[in-house]
Amino acid sequence: ALAEFDARLKGIGPDDVCLDLGANLGVFTEKLAKTGALVHAYEPDPYAYDIAQERVGHLPNVVLHNQAVAHQGGTFTMRRSVKFDRKPAAATGSSTIVFDNPKKFKAGGFDVTVRAFRDVLADIGRPVALVKMDIEGAEFDILRDVFAHPQDFAIDALFCETHERSVYAEFAEIDRMRRQSGALAHPYVNLYWP
């Protein structure tokens, strides 16, 4: 998936818009920004957001949003990995508004603002060249919507990490979507993100 992602980046330039959903520490936001495209990066975990702000916040073509993105908007509770206290920078990539397994996630959490994916796209108001989505379980309903109504989404390419190993009931659905993605004329969907 990374090779395909990098190949897609070669065709993106300053006239394009990209989204990094689940920007975490800003590593892929930075890669997207190097194309010259306008990059909207969403990261709800305040610890990761602050690191991303230091890394890419100064770039003129990056807009950082301290928010999550899911199928539905609102205010949700974010839980962090049980590993956060020992290795916070390594653990923020697992922060979630969906999962609550007490063996993997700390009790409690904190409220975060969540934007609906369709609202994010509507606010941009023009086609999006590439969406990188790594949103720890919030992708399932967004993907269902994209596959059910692909014509509604002005997106050229979507690269998404799927977290079906945390929700075994989603295995069959993600497998179906992976098979269906090859038949989609538009958008290009890659469900094999690292």
Image (cartoon, rainbow, N blue to C red):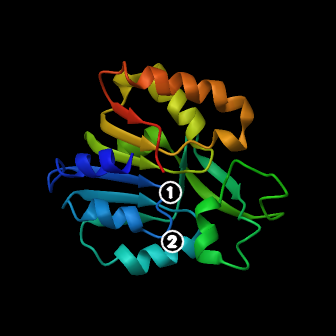
Determine the residue positioned at 23% across, 65% down. Answer: 34
Q: Is residue 50 left or right of residue 38?
A: right
Occupied quadrant, residue 14: bottom left
For residue 3, side relative to residue 21 (left or right): left
Q: Which mark is residue 98?
A: none
The total of numbered circles placed on residues is 2
The residue singled out by tag 1 in the image is 22
Where is mark 2, residue-wise? Answer: 49
The spot of residue 166 in percent (x, y) is 71, 44
Is residue 75 visible in the rendered image? The answer is yes
The three-letter code of the residue at mark 1 reads: Gly
The tag earlier along the polypeptide, 2 or 1, is 1
**Badge 2 local density, few (<14 within 10 Å), some, or many (20+)?**
many
Within the image, what quadrant is residue 89 found in? bottom right
150 and 185: which one is in front?
185
Instruction: Estimate the x, y position of residue 174 in percent, counting from the top left.
Output: 57, 29
What residue is rendered at 55% in x and 50% in y?
Answer: 135
- Quadrant location of residue 84? bottom right
